[in-house]
Amino acid sequence: MNADTPPPEHLAAPGTEKPRRFRPKLRYELIGCGLHGHELLGTDAAALRPEDELFARESGGLRWYRCMRCDSWVALTPPDHPTRKYPPSREEITLPLRGKPLRNRYVLRLIAVDRLVHFLALGGLATVVFCHVNGASPELTDDEAFTLVMDVASTNIDLSTIAERLRLTTTTN
Ligand SMILES: [Zn+2]
């Protein structure tokens, strides 16, 4: 680091800031850990190295693991049957999404759910409307139905006019 560069701004760990009264801050990391559990490293390691102190420490017979997503420290007992000697090295670690990329993922999923709800609701409504139209006017031919749909699509026709035309079509047949 250059002497002229200012030190990086200190960012508080998610969930440690004092909440504002009227505009609380939503921490997407906490949602992720609430849904999927904490992202802990080295829970299956037999021993810890000094360089692992960033995310795992031993104290008082317990191991403290730092969540890679939300920065929470979780105390667990060391594993009874470790499967590896040391925690994974930095090259083996894939960090979970945090901050704005994680927020973008949740927003995109929310948009997808919104689209799905619209698709299901409008599809169901269209099915009900078409079933009702077919039940009310079984004599409506394909040409008449096509003309009606094209008229509705091309003009600013209101619902009462559509109902009147359907009624006329039904009574004339
Ligand atoms: Zn977490």
Image: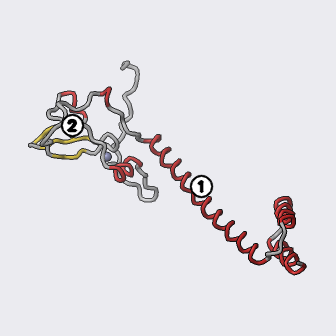
Q: Nearer the viewer, mark 2 or mark 1?
A: 1
Circle number at residue 127: none
What is the x, y in percent for residue 63? 16, 41
Residue at the disc numbered 2: 56
Instruction: Pick whichever, 148 or 59, lies toward us.
Output: 148
Q: Is residue 127 above or below residue 92?
A: below
> Considering only order in the chain, which callout, 1 or 2, is on the residue closer to the N terminus?
2
Residue occupying image coordinates x 88% and y 78%: 173
Q: Residues at badges 2 and 1 in contact (C-beta under 8 Å)?
A: no
Left or right, residue 60 beside residue 144:
left
Q: Is residue 136 above or below residue 44?
A: below
What amino acid is found at the position of numbered circle 2 in the picture?
A: Ala
Instruction: Specify whether residue 160 is in view.
Output: no
Q: Is residue 92 above or below residue 131?
A: above
- Is disc 2 placed on a helix, strand or loop? strand
- Measure the C-alpha gap from mark 2 to mark 1: 42 Å
**Label 2 near ligand 1 (CB < 8 Å):** no
Instruction: Pick whichever, 16 or 93, lies toward us.
Output: 93
Instruction: Pick whichever, 106 or 119, lies toward us.
Output: 119
Quarter of the image where one finds residue 80: top left
What is the x, y in percent for residue 157? 84, 67
What is the x, y in percent for residue 71? 30, 42
Residue at the disc numbered 1: 115
Residue occupying image coordinates x 84% and y 62%: 146
Residue occupying image coordinates x 26% and y 31%: 88
Mark 2 surroundings within 10 Å by alpha-carbon count, few (fewer than 14), some (14 through 19), many (20 or more) = many
